[in-house]
Image (spheres, rainbow, N blue to C red):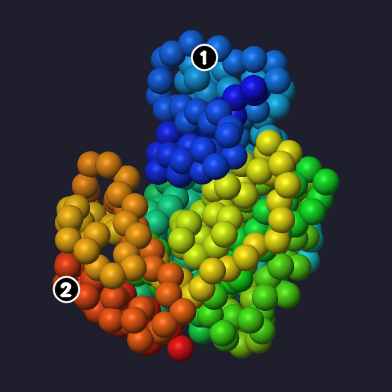
């Protein structure tokens, strides 16, 4: 049997490994800093849980494999400059932007994008890191070291943040989950709901946008597209060529999780239509210690990543799936008492949007 190697051994790699059991696949996540000599066979498959990686012994070995699925795509989407260029070329709506070059001045960005401008590092930024706001009112200048290393985006007055998560197989067949509704706090995803009734009106648009991108890249596997909803339209914020945090609800709320879909696609197994089990809520666990009592909350499906707890670090998540909104709200309120005080905002948002 061929082995599927996963470049990266974080929580996404671990969940890909867990999903492999139902498919009888040999999936092996590999720490990118490992110095082991891998025994990779010619027929083995390589995928990744991350968009970019340093050059190490194992990344060189895995990158050399001829069956590295989407190998040429990761770098293009990991760089926000080339990602934006691809979206523009495909006429997929995205936040108005400019490249920040040697000669670019803050005044140029204010003229082109407005009085509030967000600088984003071209690579490496995540969970609010690698970002810097400029304000014309404060006469802010572009910080030292950001020229040729970032793009600038217009501030978008969005009504909702949503994600489109889909899978495409080698034959070009695509399957999409219902759009998820997301809450970010300080740039970090804190809560997700799916499906949400008001998102249904934007489902076709979201599928068309993500489907167009995947087809243009001949992409195989799961891809996520984070979008702003502005009025009746969606506008792409960022794209992730991998399984994604905003799709974690599918572990409990769908008959096939995003992790199983990804493995099915890269292993050339059937990718039938997504069947949603019921309304789902996900609470991200950020920089908080493990609490055994979480597992006593009715309906709570706890995923703990066994990572060192640090401020701002994703260390786990908790899923709920229940068609009884009253019970789901009660469970979320019970969980609220077991979480740090700052989670009251997250639980309130989830409860308010359940309807």
Residue receiving disc 1: 38
User: Where does residue 12 sit, x and y in percent of width and height?
Assistant: 46, 44
Residue 300 versus residue 331 in the image, above or below: above
In this figure, which residue is indicated by the disc labeled 2? 337
Residue 219 at x, y percent in the picture: 73, 46
Q: Give the mark toward the camera: 2 or 1.
A: 2
Regarding residue 186, the answer to whether it shows in the image is no
Q: Can you give x and y, in whole percent of width and height, for residue 329 in the image?
A: 33, 82
**Looking at the image, which residue is at 38% across and 63% down?**
319
- The answer to which quarter of the image holds residue 227 is bottom right
Q: Is mark 2 on a helix, strand or loop?
A: loop
Residue in view at x 57 percent, y 86 percent: 198
Q: Which of 20 and 9 is in front in this view?
A: 20
- Assign a secondary structure to mark 1: loop
331 relative to 253 in the view: left or right: left
Q: Is residue 351 above or below residue 17?
A: below
- x 43%, y 75%: residue: 322
Residue 3 falls in image quadrant: top right
Residue 188 visible from this viewpoint: yes
């Amino acid at each position: 049997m061929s082995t599927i190697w996963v470049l990266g051994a974080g929580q996404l790699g671990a969940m890909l490994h867990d999903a492999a059991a139902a498919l009888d696949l040999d999936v092996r996540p590999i720490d990118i800093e490992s110095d082991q000599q891998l025994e990779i066979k010619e027929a083995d498959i390589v995928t990744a849980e991350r968009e970019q990686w340093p050059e190490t012994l194992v990344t060189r070995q895995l990158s050399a494999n001829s069956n590295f699925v989407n190998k040429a795509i990761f770098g293009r989407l990991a760089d926000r400059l080339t990602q934006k260029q691809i979206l523009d070329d495909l006429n997929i709506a995205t936040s108005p932007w400019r490249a920040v070059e040697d000669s670019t001045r803050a005044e140029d960005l204010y003229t082109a994008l407005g009085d509030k401008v967000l600088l984003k590092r071209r690579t490496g930024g995540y969970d609010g890191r690698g970002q810097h706001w400029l304000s014309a009112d404060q006469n802010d200048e572009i910080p030292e070291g950001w020229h040729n290393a970032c793009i600038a985006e217009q501030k978008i007055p969005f009504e909702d943040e949503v994600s489109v998560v889909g899978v495409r197989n080698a034959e070009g067949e695509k399957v999409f989950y219902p759009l998820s509704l997301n809450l970010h706090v300080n740039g970090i995803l804190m809560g997700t709901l799916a499906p949400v009734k008001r998102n249904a009106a934007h489902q076709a648009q979201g599928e068309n946008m993500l489907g167009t991108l995947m087809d243009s890249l001949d992409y195989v596997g799961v891809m996520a597209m984070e979008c702003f909803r502005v009025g009746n339209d969606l506008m792409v914020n960022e794209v992730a060529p991998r399984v994604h945090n905003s799709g974690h609800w599918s572990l409990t709320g769908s008959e096939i999780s995003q992790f199983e879909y990804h493995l099915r696609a890269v292993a050339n197994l059937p990718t039938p239509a997504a069947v949603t089990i019921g309304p789902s809520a996900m609470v991200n666990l950020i920089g908080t210690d493990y609490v055994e009592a979480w597992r006593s909350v009715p309906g709570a499906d706890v995923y703990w990543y066994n990572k060192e707890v640090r401020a701002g670090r994703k260390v786990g998540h908790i899923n709920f799936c229940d068609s009884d909104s009253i019970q789901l709200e009660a469970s979320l309120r019970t969980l609220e008492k077991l979480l740090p005080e700052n989670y009251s905002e997250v639980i309130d948002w989830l409860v308010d949007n359940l309807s």
